[in-house]
Image (tube, rainbow, N blue to C red):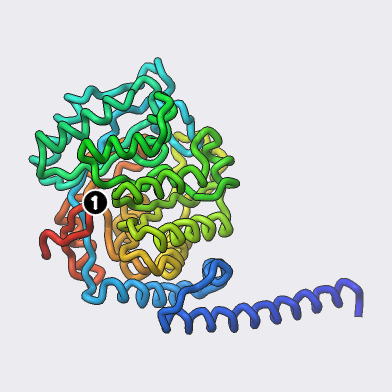
Amino acid sequence: MGVCTARREIDFTCTKIYFSFAVGKIENIYAKVFEGSRISTDEAALLLDKADLLQLGSLADIARKRFNPENIVTFVADTNPNYTNICDTECLFCAFWRPPGAYDSYTLSVDKVIEIMRTSYHNGATTVLLQGGHNPELKLDYYIEIVERTTKEIPELHLHAFSAPEIAAIAKYENLDTKYVLQTLWDAGLRTIPGGGAEVLSNRARRAISPLKIDADTWMRITREAHLVGFKTTATMMFGHLEDDEDIIEHLFRIRELQDETGNFLAFIPWTFKPKNTLLEKRIKDEVGGERYLRVLSVCRIFLDNFKHVQGSWFTQGKKMGSMSLHYGASDLGGTLYDENVLGCAENKIRSTVDELVHMIKSAGFNPAQRNTYYEILEKF
């Protein structure tokens, strides 16, 4: 037998042994999920890498049913305006930001922000997800006025606003403590904060895609501070860029730990990177496809055993995949997004109506219900 042939046989034998070992380990993980036991980061990594997708979806469905036994899938009627596109953080994955003085840069007045929100409310929105760039010209008073006027002038509309990186930017521009900024926003009437700006909570990945943005530790610190003030928040994850499986697992571990401590995360929202018109476009050859998306979604649902809701992303994956996500652990389909500019700049202009979301949910065999920002059901269909 030649040396090369012998090596090939050894490699093949090692592969068989590893595969058999992995299959045995995965079967043990399946048993833990059936029992409702918590899985480790190593087990999550093995599921992400080796598990059969259909079996993974079945496990995620079991995890979903523990929190949502009635097969209800929720959505919210919302809008997502952006108050400024001027940003000094210059993330490589973002097609929305503009430097100060750019011909197409803008900053909305508080009056204009209120007008947009009032119009959205009259069009049926119950929530406004308000975020924007990190604009050094905007001071804390601007944000406080938005909160106070919204709660006074449109009290039936819930303002879900200002992610952790925005809080950090406000504090930096005025040399304030982030705890002070959060407490001031709370005193003005803000009660929930979106989980944006998390991307992947791995400093290795963040240095590659957003080197000027707050690091993973700072995002976690500010979110923890928000929880301790009393805010409810969401947690997000954007994947499909320069991260690897290890980064994803680190992200999930970080937020699971914080949820164990505070319990103030309302939901987890994983979505996929859209590279069009971004500085990363030439480095990302292919967008994340359905198989990878469903695999990551399922592992998120299984691993995050202290989150009631994991959201499916029709917005980045399309409406058919939105329906499919409900069989892979998702119990919520997010919002209608009447107005959205960040992913719109990446040529992702998909939108939805209440009727379309109801159809997506029913076509997948689930019971649709409209919710508010706190995931309380407002109406069943």
Residue located beneath label 1 in the image: 335
Asked if one can make out residue 97 in the rendered structure from this viewpoint, the answer is no
Which residue: 45% across, 78% down? 37
Q: Quadrant of residue 290?
A: bottom left
- Left/right of residue 11 with respect to residue 49 in the rendered view: right
Query: In this view, which residue lies farthest toward the right?
Result: 2
Q: Is residue 21 above or below residue 327?
A: below
Q: Position of residue 63 (x, y in %)?
A: 37, 74
Asked if one can make out residue 283 in the rendered structure from this viewpoint, the answer is yes
Which residue: 16% across, 30% down? 114
Q: Quadrant of the C terminus?
A: bottom left
Q: Quadrant of residue 71?
A: bottom left
Q: Is residue 31 above or below residue 47?
A: below
Please tell me which residue lies in front, 300 or 142.
142
Which residue: 17% across, 24% down? 111
* Residue type of the residue flagged with mark 1: Gly
Please tell me which residue lies in front, 12 or 27.
27
Q: Position of residue 353 (x, y in %)?
A: 18, 50
- Left/right of residue 202 with respect to residue 380 in the rendered view: right
Q: Position of residue 361 (x, y in %)?
A: 22, 64
Q: Position of residue 380 (x, y in %)?
A: 12, 65
